[in-house]
Image: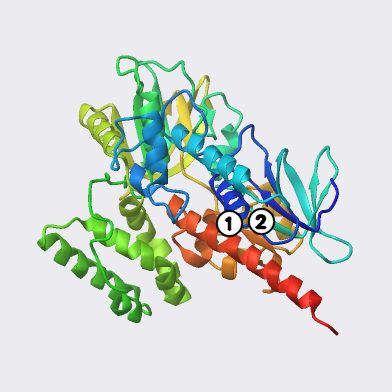
Amino acid sequence: MNHAQNTIVIVGAGFCGTVLAANLLRRPPSDATDIVLIERGSAMGRGVAYAVREFPHLLNVPAARLSADSRDPLQFLRFAQRHVPDADSEDFLPRELYGDYLQEVLLQAERGTIAHTRLLRIFDEVRHITRRSDGKGFAVQFLDRPPIMADRVILALGNPPPPLLPWAAAVRDHRAYRHDPWELPKTLAAEHSVLIVGNGLTMADAALELTQDTSRAPALHTISRRGLIPLPQTTFRPSAVRGNGEALLACADSLRQVLAMIRELTREVENRGGDWREVVTFIRHLAPALWRRLPLAEQRRFVRHLQAHWDIHRHRLPPQLAARIASLRRSGKLQVNAGRIDSVIAAGEQLRVSWRPRGGGSATLTVDLVVNATGPDYVLKRGAVPLLNSLRAAGLVSEDALDLGIRTARYGACVDAQGRTNQDLYYLGPMLRAEHWEATAATELRDHAEQLAAHLVDSRVESAARSRQPL
């Protein structure tokens, strides 16, 4: 591939990469530009979240709040209604359908772009990204194909895989252990038992898939440190709580004061007949500013003591899934535990789990399957993502003080090991939470993608203008 006048490489074509590419195609730079979208999987616009699967997992946000274009809030709902005519704004639709939608968003943007802008799709895995010898931009290197010379690179790698926890190392190759919670066996029956490690949204997805045939469903056990599971979604008014949040932001030096104000606001809302979810949505929009104002010690206190409680209120279950989980618990088919795993050892075809319940004591559990549903491993130095590990080793990216993700500056520009902002290397995805805290929902990442696309175009125009100025 020849190095065009302007080459923007996007590594990853899940939600973030696809939406960023679509924005660049709709409002491209004024000079000749190649937008290179690279996906290591078999389909663009899907990633892990919206992949085509045998089991129809649901989105956990209503259809009316999932547009990939902030200028057209009901875009996804209209798309969905073409395929599911009776879908309404509060429906929780299949994730696969959302992947179909993202593919159409990209296709429509490509068809409407101007002549001097090209979208180049590459299905391959990026192994390394290195500085070019002239110091301008990067060489994006693959295993079996020539490198691409890029003026700018955006890392849109999606969620990292779950961590390989200490107890899992000895059984990672055992047939009864699943490190990938999306790869579940189809052969389990009522006489079998399963331990799902983790109690978040992934646990609920795995539990639903494993019990789809109620007559053959295995006995399920779950475990997490606190035993908290996500709360259900309801129909509520997302913009019911108004204001700029200045009173809350003003006391951001004390997490205790912030929490007290949130509780008081929740009482006021519920006394007026509202829903606490309205308050959570209000806090969500304030979260980036609030997070940046909290002193490091208060941020650390939040992660240690309050994050698990925030997560179950913030990342909620679709009503259908919440009802199914409640039914499984009532029937005794699902037992939710709080505690820590000490060890897991092979017991023939099964696995024997030794664990300590929260509050003291010890227990053992022998199961036919252990599923790691602990969620993404955001700790950069553990090296869960080889490309990020390579970039960290080269000093091009760095982690934050709390190991929440990647250090970034404005627009997601990566901050290197020396604390310098790199204006040619950007990150877009959930590891922005190191700077913004709330950076996992589609609408939040959509907004980041739109802002980054505008910045890439505007900064290119500024650079071209400077190059034309007389000496």
- Residue 77 visible within the image: yes
- How many numbered marks have been drawn onto this rendered protein structure? 2
Question: In which quadrant of the rendered view does residue 197 lie?
Answer: top left
338 displayed left or right of 4: left
> What secondary structure is found at the residue carrying circle 2?
strand
Do labels 1 and 2 touch, CB within 8 Å?
yes
Vertical position of residue 352 compared to residue 438: above or below = above
Residue at numbered disc 2: 154
Across and down, in percent, residue 195 comes to 41, 32
Residue at numbered disc 1: 428
Q: How crowded is mark 2: few (under 14 residues within 10 Å), some or many (20 or more)?
A: many
Across and down, in percent, residue 327 comes to 23, 30
Q: Which mark is residue 331?
A: none
Residue sitting at x 63%, y 46%: 12
**Front residue of 333 and 183:** 183
- Residue 46 visible within the image: no
Amino acid identity at mark 2:
Ile
Q: How crowded is mark 1: few (under 14 residues within 10 Å), some or many (20 or more)?
A: many
User: If the image is split into quadrants, where does the N terminus sit?
Assistant: top right
Residue sitting at x 67%, y 74%: 419
Across and down, in percent, residue 298 comes to 41, 73
> What secondary structure is found at the residue carrying circle 1?
loop
Across and down, in percent, residue 287 comes to 39, 66
Amino acid identity at mark 1:
Leu
User: If the image is split into quadrants, where does the C terminus sit?
Assistant: bottom right
